[in-house]
Amino acid sequence: MAANNPEPHSESDSAHGEEHGQHIANENLVVLFMFVAMIIGGLLRVISKKYKISYTLLIFLTGIVFGRFPLMFGDMMNEAI
């Protein structure tokens, strides 16, 4: 039976450790995205009820606004990874 050794045995083990760290960072981004999306959805629901605007229309317009600036949001996401 092999002893548990926390040190990497080869370069491939070290690369796997770096990939694992990136995997965790990506999971954090997914959780952040879901949290922000729910906050935006809640705010849009309040605006929809207060101003009697269709919720679907607000979601559509919000998508256009976020889609209009993909490079800005893409750069932010690439820096986070």
Image (cartoon, rainbow, N blue to C red):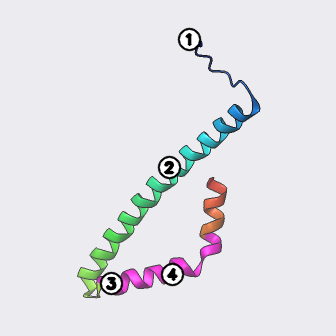
Judge depth for marks 1 and 4 and give the one in front. 1
| Above or below, 69 relative to 27 | below
Q: Calculate the distance from the C-alpha at mark 2 to the C-alpha at mark 1.
A: 34 Å
Q: Position of residue 63 (x, y in %)?
A: 46, 79
The amino acid type found where label 2 is placed reads: Glu
Q: Calculate the distance from the C-alpha at mark 3 to the C-alpha at mark 4.
A: 14 Å
The amino acid type found where label 4 is placed reads: Val
Side (left or right) of 45 relative to 81? left
Residue 71 within the magenta-colored segment of the rendering: yes
Residue 27 is tagged as 2
Q: Element type at marker 2?
A: helix
Residue pointed to by mark 4? 65
The quadrant of the picture occupied by the N terminus is: top right
The residue under the point 59% across, 68% down is 73
The amino acid type found where label 1 is placed reads: Met
Q: Position of residue 42 (x, y in %)?
A: 31, 69
Mark 2 residue crowding within 10 angstroms, few (<14) / some (14–19) / many (20+): few
Residue 56 is tagged as 3
Count of numbered circles on the image: 4
| Above or below, 27 relative to 50 | above
Q: Earlier in the sequence, mark 2 or mark 1?
A: 1
Side (left or right) of 45 relative to 40? left
Mark 1 residue crowding within 10 angstroms, few (<14) / some (14–19) / many (20+): few
Between 11 and 63, the residue placed more toward the observer is 11
The residue under the point 25% across, 81% down is 50
Residue 7: name its quadrant.
top right
Q: Element type at marker 3?
A: helix
For the magenta stretch, what is the residue range? Answer: 55-72
Q: Earlier in the sequence, mark 2 or mark 4?
A: 2
| Above or below, 35 relative to 27 | below
Contact, CB < 8 Å: mark 1 with mark 4? no
